[in-house]
Amino acid sequence: MEQEEILEFDSSQIPEPESISDVIYQLMVNPNLSPINYFNDFSDTLPDPKRMDNDASAETGIIELNDGSKLVAMSTHALHHHLEQDPKKAAEILVTRAVRKMVCFGAEPIALTAMVYHINYSDPNGNYIASGAKAGLENAAQAFGLKIADRKIRFDNFDAHDSQSPTLIVSLLGTMKKNDQDEVVTITPSFKNKGNNIFLLGRTSDDICTSDYLEFYHGISNSPLPEFDLDFEIRLLESVKQLISKNMIQSASPVGKGGLFFSLLRAGWVNELGFDITTAAENRIDAFLFGESMGRIILGVDPALEDEFVDFMFEQKIPFFTLGHVTKGEIRIDDESFGYIDKMSESI
């Protein structure tokens, strides 16, 4: 698909699937969505489990320094979609995704480094990508209060990379907060208890651009970058930080690879808990479940704190949606059963 076709892309051209079950089981074999990580267990020590959930240290790169003085969080993210088309927006999106994930684990992002691969910045197109990516990185870093390490953004320059898509990689460093009792504040994406309410923070839309669903199910590998509003992202993450500090939520998970459905699935795998949700009637069901639009976070809330949570969110003026509740293991969407979480994970 040429750039003109990308810009003219319209999700309404994509037919909605007749069977959600068919989409789920076709995407299950997508390696991008597999829960299996073959690069595990580099460390022979982990942070004290009394101070944090085990899945937090495994999933976010939370490391306790040898002298026990501090916990730091590290995360690396990459993006190859449309750096040629809109490098500034692509860079802002990548930094925002990295920050959103770190905030959802209770960490405070403080600094980033970046690298752009597979460009020749001596030619006009390569220079456009490099300068646009630099502008986007600096804009996002300023918006989130991040330092860019050494004030440098590194580039490679290899003439033989013509067949490779330009790729931007950012690494984020953060620190862990402590509460008034000098305890480290942590939270994880994993559902904690059957019966907890599940809320979706952010705006729902019919956006399926650059999603694994669009690429692997429909075979469309090029589409515009997803809808994105940096100012809204800042407000959204500030609300999540306050919810964590007020102990009003038990889990927080950014909607990422595979969209809402696979983000919910990842939230249930660790403790073998399922979910019973209702989709938004005003949205395409495939976009609601599998779209990877920005600015959305899944929260697990204890029913005892539901009223307090709802009151707080109304004060924040952040859109939120009641998805449903955590189950003992069954997965239900709009009153239809899709099996159980242990069978889902075994099928990968």
Image: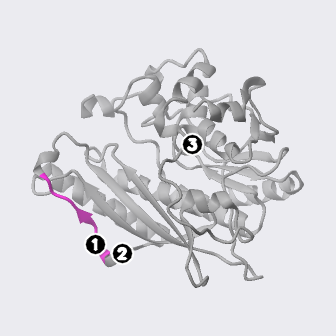
Q: Which mark is residue 35?
A: 3
Q: x, y (%) of residue 100? A: 55, 58
Q: Which residue is mark 2?
A: 149
Amino acid type at circle 3 is Pro
Magenta highlight on residue 324: no
Q: Is residue 269 visible?
A: yes
Whether tag 2 and tag 1 are in contact, CB under 8 A, the answer is yes
Start-end of magenta stretch = 151-158
Amino acid type at circle 1 is Lys
Mark-to-mark CA distance, 2 and 1: 7 Å
Magenta highlight on residue 152: yes
Q: x, y (%) of residue 4? A: 26, 31
Which residue: 67% across, 46% down?
Answer: 267
Which residue: 46% across, 43% down?
Answer: 227
Left/right of residue 103 with respect to residue 342 in the rendered view: left
Q: Is residue 320 visible?
A: no
